[in-house]
Amino acid sequence: MKIGKIELGERPVFLAPMEDVTDIGFRMLCKRFGAAMVYTEFVSAEALVRDVKSTVRKLTISDEERPVGIQIYGRDIEAMVEAAKIVEQAGPDLIDLNFGCPVKKVASKGAGAGMLQHILLPDGSIDLNAKLLEITRQVVEAVSVPVTVKTRLGWNCEQLAITQLAPLLQECGIQALTIHGRTRSQMYTGEADWTLIGEVKHNPDIHIPIIGNGDIKSLSDADQAFDTYGVDAVMIGRATFGCPWIFSRRELSLDEKIDVLEEQLRINIAHIDANDKRAEKKSAELCGILHTRRHLAASPVFKGIPNFRETRIRMLRAEKADELIQILEECRVALR
């Protein structure tokens, strides 16, 4: 499978872009364990154009994680185009346009999945002048790297637009389309519906890669999606929390998993600078800890520890690397 000239191998599995999750340390580890493509946290176009430091920081990528995509979102055409040009200078392998984020602070302002709200005309056809399509056209024209799109089935179950929308996005010049099998109104509830994803993939007019997303919790789930729906790639999101080895075909031992989590902490301390708005005037060490401890607290590794709630609270309060490592070592002993 290829996106543009990017070779991704057979049946590739991707790490989804996720706010406050896909920082550089996590991406590097997911790549090491087999993720064919990783993505940064999504980036606000408006904040990027305003040169907000905490947003610009998200553009930092490493050659060790390639191929890597940077995802942008916004509601203003000019800001999205300008942001895409700025992102291109950071050297990603592709730029992804987020038309699928369902959270209120994004969608209610008309960005992310908010782009899907008024895309259908009264007769049920797609509005060819929809802002979503115009943003896509203009971004594709403005940059030389491949442009892709990530979106959902529609705004709600009465407005399932994806089968009509996919060919129009292809006409805009995108080189791959990721579809999350839920509507915006579903948020992350219920089960993802892959039937429409499969319908898009099997549309004879579609020639770009179709990437399926939603409720993939293991490589076995990914394999089933490939077999059942014929998608070109599968993207994993929430199931990766605290579990970068989910992309590995080899089962890691408990000790290996804890070693990986400790390494993630060290990578983030080394690579995440102290310009993070949330950790202003704090050390680079603390910035790395802030980005890591949410992964640790969510990791399935620790489910077997009695009364883990107290340990989890300690993890989320730790402000020194040595303190956090000590907690992880205590967990290692408790799980043996």
Image: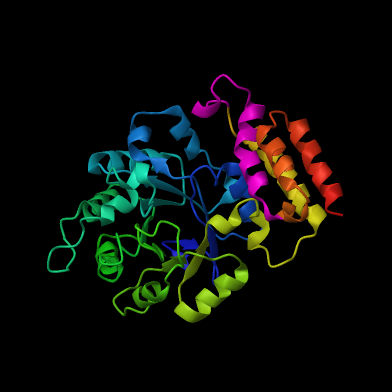
Quarter of the image for the C terminus: give it.
bottom right
Residue 131 falls inside the magenta stretch: no
Q: Is residue 109 visible?
A: yes
Q: Residue furthest left?
A: 123
Task: State which region is magenta.
Answer: 274-300
The spot of residue 213 in percent (x, y) is 46, 64
What residue is shown at x 64% (from left), y 28% (from top)?
Answer: 286
What scheme was used to colour the molecule? rainbow
Q: Is residue 263 visible?
A: no
The spot of residue 314 in percent (x, y) is 71, 36
Q: Relative to residue 267, is residue 236 drawn left or right? A: left
What residue is shown at x 36% (from left), y 41% (from top)?
Answer: 105
- Secondary structure mostly taken by the magenta-highlighted segment of the chain: helix
Q: Toward which corner of the image does residue 174 lie, by quadrant?
A: bottom left
Q: Is residue 268 above or below residue 121?
A: above
The spot of residue 81 in percent (x, y) is 28, 43
The spot of residue 230 in percent (x, y) is 46, 78
